[in-house]
Image (cartoon, helix red, strand yellow):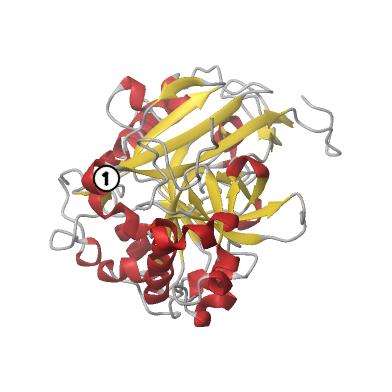
């Protein structure tokens, strides 16, 4: 049987010509050389080689952007360039006249090593699922209102640690920290015993903004390059002891996993949907009633050791990515190329739509054990019935390391 051509995708492949996500890869022949790539089915197109191979398709002016070892130069180039490059890549892959030239530039996905696709500048995480926030509030504050009084007036968030954002496949070492159960007389130090996941969606900023110049809802597309999946690993016992009166700190900052592929924002046009009805009118800078639909119909699947754990629906998120960006900058904070902000845990109204173990077990556990592997995948409806894929996020839990601050408790 002849070998299948890389241009002949299997039916229903979510990484076809309507998706074309960007990543960074290296090969066994040159492991120290990182190259930009675009995923097409089960292959990776060497993007840096494309300008020389097809000078009439890919403008020479973009060559320097495509030969970098990170996506950041392309991110910074702005939306008109993003659209030109994406159109050129699609032509190169779909025009039969280019097959002979492009075929040698396609590498089997299994033969390359994938890397963190961009240098993360800042990392912000939001808390924008009403279902998740309500469930967590009932667990942590059973005698008070589930939602804090500000929740429906603004997208709550916190600044995370950009230096511990890691690419899918990077092992996650069980973190150490202080923890104190309500009945304990004093805190103890040791490895987390309540390690959890959070299934989230991330948004990657390309075009920066100016300090003191807020980014309005209508400028969302000009600044956000693409979308990825995020697993915001969480040590619930460390988090519960440290987060009063401030927000998450060591319970979150040890690792945040992102997919190796960034899917262009424009690929999700057919997946745009109206957010859930809001019973509290937002302030003008967050009012999107006259804007294009800000929700995204992303179908997420969470697997634990290969078994489906839940299927959280991103369309159920109360605050949209455009509103999150507007709120992030409304005080004059500026955007930088490579900023990453995440949606917060995605959860739906049904028991099989919850995005973390805290919710799935109502706070009782069990939580993640050493050796457990968690994988997030997702897709969205595209034009003409196709599926738009998001790269998976996988992480395996490794045992806590010996810690100089004290013996494990």
Q: Where is residue 190 drawn, in percent x and y?
A: 74, 30
Viewport quadrant of the N terminus: top right
Q: Nearer the viewer, residue 272 or 161?
A: 272
Q: Where is residue 62 drawn, in percent x and y?
A: 51, 77
Q: Residue at x 55, y 17 (%)?
A: 366
Q: Residue at x 53, y 23 (%)?
A: 304
Q: Where is residue 249 drawn, in percent x and y?
A: 59, 47
- Is the residue 21 above or below the residue 328 in the image? above
What residue is disc 1 on?
318
> Residue farthest to the front?
1
Q: Is residue 117 visible?
A: no
Mark 1: which secondary structure? Answer: loop
Q: Is residue 319 left or right of residue 356?
A: left
Q: Residue at x 66, y 24 (%)?
A: 185
Viewport quadrant of the C terminus: top right
Q: Nearer the viewer, residue 40 or 264?
A: 40
Q: Residue at x 41, y 36 (%)?
A: 10
């Amino acid at each position: 049987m002849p070998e299948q051509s890389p241009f002949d995708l299997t039916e229903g492949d979510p990484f076809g010509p309507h998706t074309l996500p960007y990543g960074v890869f290296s090969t066994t022949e040159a492991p120290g050389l990182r190259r930009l790539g675009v995923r097409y089915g089960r292959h990776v197109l060497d993007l840096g080689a494309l300008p020389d191979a097809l000078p009439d398709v890919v403008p020479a002016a973009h060559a320097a952007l495509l030969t970098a070892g990170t996506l950041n130069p392309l991110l910074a180039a702005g939306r008109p360039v993003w659209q030109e490059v994406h159109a050129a890549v699609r032509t190169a892959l779909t025009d039969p006249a280019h097959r002979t030239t492009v075929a040698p530039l396609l590498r089997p996905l299994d033969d390359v090593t994938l890397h963190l696709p961009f240098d993360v500048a800042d990392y912000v995480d939001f808390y924008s699922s009403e279902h998740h926030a309500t469930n967590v509030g009932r667990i942590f504050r059973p005698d008070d209102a589930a939602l804090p009084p500000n929740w429906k007036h603004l997208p709550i968030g916190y600044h995370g640690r950009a230096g511990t954002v890691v690419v899918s496949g990077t092992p996650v070492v069980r973190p150490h920290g202080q923890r104190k159960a309500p009945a304990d007389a004093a805190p103890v130090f040791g490895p987390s015993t309540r390690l959890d996941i959070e299934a989230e969606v991330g948004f990657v900023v390309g075009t920066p903004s100016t300090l003191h110049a807020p980014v309005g809802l209508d400028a969302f597309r000009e600044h956000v390059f693409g979308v990825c999946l995020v697993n915001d690993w969480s040590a619930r016992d460390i988090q519960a002891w440290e987060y009063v009166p401030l927000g998450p700190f060591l319970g979150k900052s040890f690792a945040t996993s992102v997919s190796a592929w960034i899917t262009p924002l424009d690929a999700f046009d057919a997946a745009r949907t109206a957010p859930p009805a809001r019973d509290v009118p937002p302030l003008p800078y967050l009012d999107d009633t006259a804007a294009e639909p800000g929700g995204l119909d992303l179908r997420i699947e969470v697997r634990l050791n290969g078994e489906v754990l839940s299927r959280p629906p991103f369309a159920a998120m109360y605050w949209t990515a455009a509103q999150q960006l507007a709120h992030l900058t409304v005080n004059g904070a500026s955007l930088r190329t490579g900023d990453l902000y995440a949606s917060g845990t995605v959860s739906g109204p049904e028991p099989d739509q919850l995005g973390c173990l805290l919710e799935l077990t109502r706070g009782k556990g069990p939580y993640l054990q050493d050796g457990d592997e968690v994988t997030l995948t997702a897709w969205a409806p595209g034009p003409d019935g196709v599926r738009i894929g998001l790269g998976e996020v996988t992480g395996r839990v490794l045992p806590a390391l010996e810690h100089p601050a004290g013996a494990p408790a």
